Structure formats: C-alpha cells, structure tokens
Image: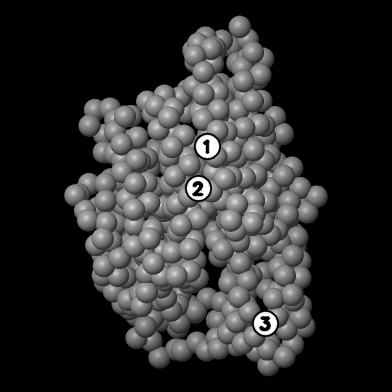
Amino acid sequence: MSYQDLVKYMNKRQALNGALTLFEWDQETTAPHKSIDKTTTYIGVLSKELFETITDENVIKLLHELENEDLTLSQKSVVKHWLKDIERLEQIPADEYQAHSELLIKAQHVWSEAKLTNNYQAFEPYLKQIFENEKRFASYRQVDHKPLYDILLDDYEPGFTTKELDAFFEQLRNEIVPLLKAIQQSNYKIDKSYNYKEYPIVKQKLFNKYIAQYIGFDYNCGIIKESEHPFTTNLHNCDVRITTHYYKNNLESALFSTIHESGHATYELNIANDLSLTPIGTGTSMGMHESQSRFYENMIGKNPLFWKNLYPKLQNVFLNNLEDISFDRFMDGINKVEPILIRTEADELTYPLHIMIRYEIEKKIFHEDIDYDELPRLWNEKYQEYLGITPKSDSEGILQDIHWASGSIAYFPSYAIGSAVAAQIYAYMKEHTHLESWIENGQFNMIKAYLGEHIHQYGAIYNTNELLIKLTGEAFNPKYYITYLKDKYIKIYHLKR
C-alpha cells in the first residue's frame, strides 16, 4: 500500500464534500424558496456517503499503515487529520449522522423563517435537538472526563480549552469594559448620521466589487453573491465564493462585510496548490481564519492610511450623501463606539462582548440542566449586563445568528480568538515589514504575498499557535489585542491614560 492508494479515496471524499458545499451555497443564495424539503433528501444521501467514505474500513487500515511510512510533511498532515476525523466520526452511528445532517438543513430554513417572523417558539424544538445531538455526539468521544464543550471546541480551535478562554475573556472584561464606560462618559461625540441616508444598492454593489478587487480578491477564481448572513466558502483555491448583504440605509454594513469576507477569501486563494484538493487544503482553524478577515476588516479597513486614496472615490460615487463629510469625520464614523444589539454590525471595541455572551450561553447549555424556553430571557439579561441594552424582539436577540441552526456549536469563541490573533500579527508586521506603506499605497499584492508565505500556504499543516510561533516567535498572546484596542480608542476619543 502507498499514499497513492489513499488519493483515490481522497478524491472521492473531496468530490462529495464539494457537492455538499455547492448545495449549501445554492440554498443560501439562489435556490427556490420551496426547494428545501426535497433537496434535503439529496443532502442526506451525500452526507451519509461522505461519512462512509471517511470511515471506510479499508481507509482506516491504509491510514494506520501510512503512519509508519516515510511521507512528506503535507502527506503526514493529511494522514494525521484524516485519522482525527475518523476518531471524531466513527463513534457516531451512520444513521444518526445522516439524520443530523438532514436536521441541520431543515433547521436553517426554519431559523430563517423564525427570524423574519420573530417566532422563537417555531425554532426552539430544532435548537434543542441540535444541542442535544451535539452533546450526545461529544459524549461518544469523551475520554478521561474531558468536558463535552472542550471536545467540540477542539474541532474549531485545536489546542484551546475553556480554561484558556475563561482567562482570555476575563482579561477583556477587566480592560475593555472600563474603556467602554470611559468612552460613553466622554464629551467627545461622533455624528455618523450620514451613514444612514439612502445609498442606492446598485451603486453599493459596484463599489463593493471594486474594493474587493482592490484588496486582492481574484474574480478569475472567485465570485460575490448576496445572502442573509454574509459568508465565505470554497471548492478549492481556484473557486472561492463570498457573499454580502446590502441595506439601502446603511452604507457601512455591506462595505465592511465585503472587506471581511475578502480576508477569508484571500486565505483560501493562497492555499498551496499541492494542498488544495486535500482535507488540509483550508484554513487551519476557525480562529486563524477569522484573524485574516478581522485583519483586513479592522486593522486595514478602518485604518486612515487605507482610506487616504479610497475615500475620494467613495465620495464621488455617493456625492449627494458624502460631499460635505470630511475625511476625519468619516474616519471617526467608521470607528465610532456605540453598543448595539446585532453582532455583525457591532463596532470593533464592543464586538468581543457579543462573543462572550454566546460563549457563556453555550457553556451553560452544556454544563447545566437548562430550559430552552428560558434562553431568550437569559440572552436578554446578558446583553443588559454587558452592553447596557436589551433586545426588543427575539429576531434581534437570540435568533440573530445562523450558527446554532447550522450546528456550529463552540464556533463563536473563534471570532474573539481571531480578533486577538489579528492584532498580534498586525503588531508584528508593523514592526518587521513595510505594512503601513503597503496599506497607504494600495500594495495589497505585498500583503497578500507576505501572509501567503507565512500563514496561508500551509493550509492546516500547522495549528494556530504553531503558525504564530513560526511567524512572531510566540504563541497566542491577548496583550496585543488589548493594547491595540486601548491605543486606538483612547486616541479617537481623546481620553487620558
């Protein structure tokens, strides 16, 4: 047996995964509204076939044989990751896996309707079943009394545990909450009413397409569509797809969603060719992936250097709304701190508090006997506690995110981890490269090449901490994130240190 024998199974695995990706893309973008029930049958069959391909007895035997062979680094990584997938999946009966896959497709459809109609009760049975399934699946994999939530967390963030995350969020709570209060008490007020004037969506689409290309999105290998919840997906490094969502009375929403998703896309477009059609031909973790989108959205996209040449172009497109808005006012506007209810629209400073709320609720569901009827109340209480605001409806509260409907339990912490990793990478690049000059002069080919060389090309060969150590010389360190946020917002709001 040789590695080439594994390639035959790998091609089938990737083809099935690609088919499922296309179904997901279609359902979120252009599929007919009433197609979901019947299409779910196809998805269930493909999911079961994928499950059986990954856990095939011949594959397991072959992988164990290859563990002792003289393989390349990438081949060893494929074997390692495939065995980890098997360890995760083989404990789950195939019929349960298929049923859960079908449940998730239906749940996303029900969630979408529930959000539109503010009907948590319609979604609650699906939410409960999803969480109970995930807890049961985690219990199948439990060893040495490892917390069930940590088992799922490791699927998204290898090497991170609730112990580390609790410490991370405690630092944010101790440093950022007081800063938020100081800003709210500050006499410096920012008026961004211009952002909520009417901006024709046709013009927004044209500018968003331009700005994605400006920062490196390759339309020969990518496409932009619309969806309720912006996301990025891909088949390989020559087919990367992103979506955004437009509001005619909110210029920033689609603008920064597009920059954010273009950051994700840049990661996938930069994966090395020899990894692209393998199980490790994607980002190494959700946190590292999120670090790239946050790096582009916040460290670059909300940086005065970035808009120095772009803002006149934006003004020209929306002359009626922006002609009298100065550059400084625009920069203050896109960086304004104002607690709001919707995570995806949150400002950079309060964003991690949204994640902390979801993290605490997920942990409570896993570790306590909780009544799912009470989740909206719990959600609202935490928003009042951390942000000082309370949702007026479940649509802008517990129903606002698709993640739980899609089975992405323990995913939310990745957003906060990613923001912190982005700040750590940004601090290093500012000191060791010409990053600020590249941003100011629109040399995004240089930024893309640097990130590609040090992070993207490796796919999932190395985990987040290994990549950070390779690039910066140290593992995950939240101090860079806290320093970045404090320096930035103390300056914007003219606060005393």
475 up-or-down from 338: above or below: above
Q: Is residue 489 left or right of residue 121?
A: right
Residue at disc 1, secondary structure? helix
Residue 352 occupies quadrant? bottom left
Residue at disc 3, secondary structure? loop
Residue 453 occupies quadrant? top right
Residue 155: percent from left, percent from top: 43, 38
Q: Is residue 250 left or right of residue 239?
A: left
Q: Is residue 315 left or right of residue 468?
A: right
Q: CA distance from mark 3 to mark 2?
A: 34 Å
- Toward the viewer: 247 or 280? 247
Q: CA distance from mark 1 to mark 2?
A: 9 Å
The label shown at residue 44 is 1
Sequence order check, earlier mark of 1 and 2? 1
Task: Using the rendered image of the protein, determine whether residue 160 is visible from the camera's viewpoint.
Answer: no
Residue tagged 3:
199
Residue tagged 2:
105
The amino acid at mark 2 is: Ile
